[in-house]
Image: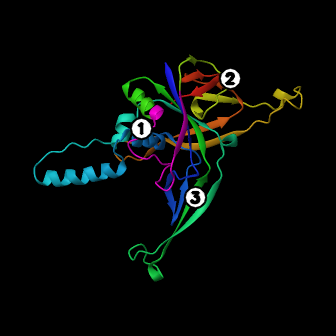
Amino acid sequence: MDVLKFTLSGRTAFFKKPDVNSYYYFTYGNIHKVALLGILGAIMGFEGYNQKAMGETYKEVYEECNTKIETGPYPEFYEKLRNIKVAIVPENEKGYIEKKIQVFNNSVGYASHEKGGNLIVKEQWLENPKWSIYLLVQGKIEEEIANRLSSFSFKYLPYLGKNDHVANIDNVEIIRTVERVENVDKIHSLYIEDYFQLNVCEEDNIFDSVDDYESIWKYEELLPVALEENTNKYEFERFIFTNSSLSTKKEALVYNCDGKFIFFF
């Protein structure tokens, strides 16, 4: 089994949360699988949400003319890529990416009913995000993704959640010496909480020297993993990124990739 690995980064990123407080838009703290599939879909030239919405519009028009047109339940990128297995390793310290608020003025006449017709929008952006992305090469579509990334042959420009945030892709490599492992005591990537139990004990390091001691840290967030078929709303799992030792709770898809235990989902 081969694994495609590459570095994904940018100056800023914005992975919009569906919940909105007035005109204040929040971002997830790390890239999630659906957003990552969107980036890979852009590289492959697959259609996205906008084309999906346009297809539904044309479907209504064709049905009025008694002509059938087929549109699937998902955007094309998700339909074709949803079964691939990926892994995400945050490269920012302890998985935390700094956030800053950006303020925009939208002064087009229809933007707001407020006095002056000026709509003030606030967005929460990630600053200098960076991830190592792993992808299991299991079939033809993964092989084509690997070929496109290796040759930097992208159909569309990839971006980090929104076209204001251009994605940088580099350090592309194929890892050929990977091995599936079980009952690991550490995971070096984001993993779904249900698969592992944290082993946190203050006495674990009591006899360690000062130089060897490393305090335990944990990053935790509820992130999208899939789209619901009828509404295309996000389905979520709770993810953890930690340096703590772990115990396996149930069988997981974990591979040893160059000495790192990587969780695929």
Q: Nearer the viewer, mark 1 or mark 2?
A: 1
Q: Residue at x 45, y 24 (%)?
A: 137
Q: Please report the bounds of the magenta region as a residue range.
A: 149-173
> Is 171 or 84 nearer to us in this picture?
171
Amino acid type at mark 1? Ser
* Residue corresponding to mark 3: 124
* Residue corresponding to mark 1: 153
Amino acid type at mark 2? Asp
Q: CA distance from mark 1 to mark 3?
A: 31 Å
Q: Residue furthest left?
A: 66
Magenta span dominant secondary structure: loop
Q: CA distance from mark 1 to mark 2?
A: 39 Å
Q: Nearer the viewer, mark 2 or mark 3?
A: 3
Q: Residue at x 75, y 31 (%)?
A: 200
User: Quarter of the image holding residue 247?
Assistant: top right
Name the mark on residue 185.
2
**Is residue 21 shown above or below 228?**
below
